[in-house]
Each structure stands twice: as C-alpha cells, then as structure tokens.
Amino acid sequence: MHSMGYVHRDLKPDNIVLNLKPLEVVIIDFDRTLLDSDDGRGTVLGTPGYFPERETLRDGSVKWDIWAYAAIVLEADMKDKKYYAANRE
C-alpha cells in the first residue's frame, strides 16, 4: 500500500483480519486512506492511541501507519486492551 503511495491512517487491531486457512493477514477499512501526497495537515481521523499526537505528524503521512504498527505490536504483548485503556486516560 505504501509503495503505491497510500496511507491507511486507521490501522488498529479491529482493522486487521487473520485467516487461518490459508494463513494470511488482511487489512480492512480503507475509509480514511489518502494518497501520501494529499495535504490533510492538522486533521485527525484515526483512533486515539493509534496515531501520533504530535503536531508535526498530523498530516496522515506514512509515519502514522508506522506508529500504529508499533502500537499494535506493543498491545499484542499486553493483557486485554491495556494499551488502549492507557491512552484513553
């Protein structure tokens, strides 16, 4: 997706589907996807905790998806939805 110039902007566990036979991982929900070149500076269209809350990264760049991926990996090592709960406080 990134190699084609798109940014998902809403990666989170709810938007990742795992099929067991055959084994594959599928990303769903492309409602907020933009071309990386689109300027949405200042807009926030993701899920809290899964996008960087830094002013310099609020344009929906590829860095959003990288941030979300790191958050998902971190959350996968926690019980229940502790990561999400920690970011809601």
Image (spheres, grey):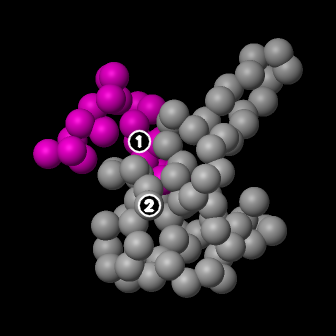
Q: Above or below — where is 88 with respect to 16?
A: below
Image quarter hosting the N terminus: bottom right
Which secondary structure lies at badge 2? loop
Nearer the observer, 10 or 71: 10
Give the residue at x 52% y 52%: 10
Instruction: Give residue 60's position: percent from left, percent from top.
Output: 51, 71
Q: Is residue 83 left or right of residue 6?
A: left
Mark 2 and mark 1: span between their CA atoms? 21 Å
Instruction: Give residue 65's position: percent from left, percent from top.
Output: 55, 59
Q: Is residue 30 left or right of residue 61?
A: right
Asked which quadrant contains residue 35, the reply is: bottom right
Q: Above or below — where is 61 with respect to 18?
A: below
Which secondary structure lies at badge 1? helix
On residue 74, the disc is: 1
**Amino acid type of disc 1?**
Leu
Start and end of the magenta stretch?
68-89
Nearer the observer, 2 or 9: 9
**Amino acid type of disc 2?**
Leu
Residue lying farthest to the left in this orientation: 89
On residue 45, the disc is: 2
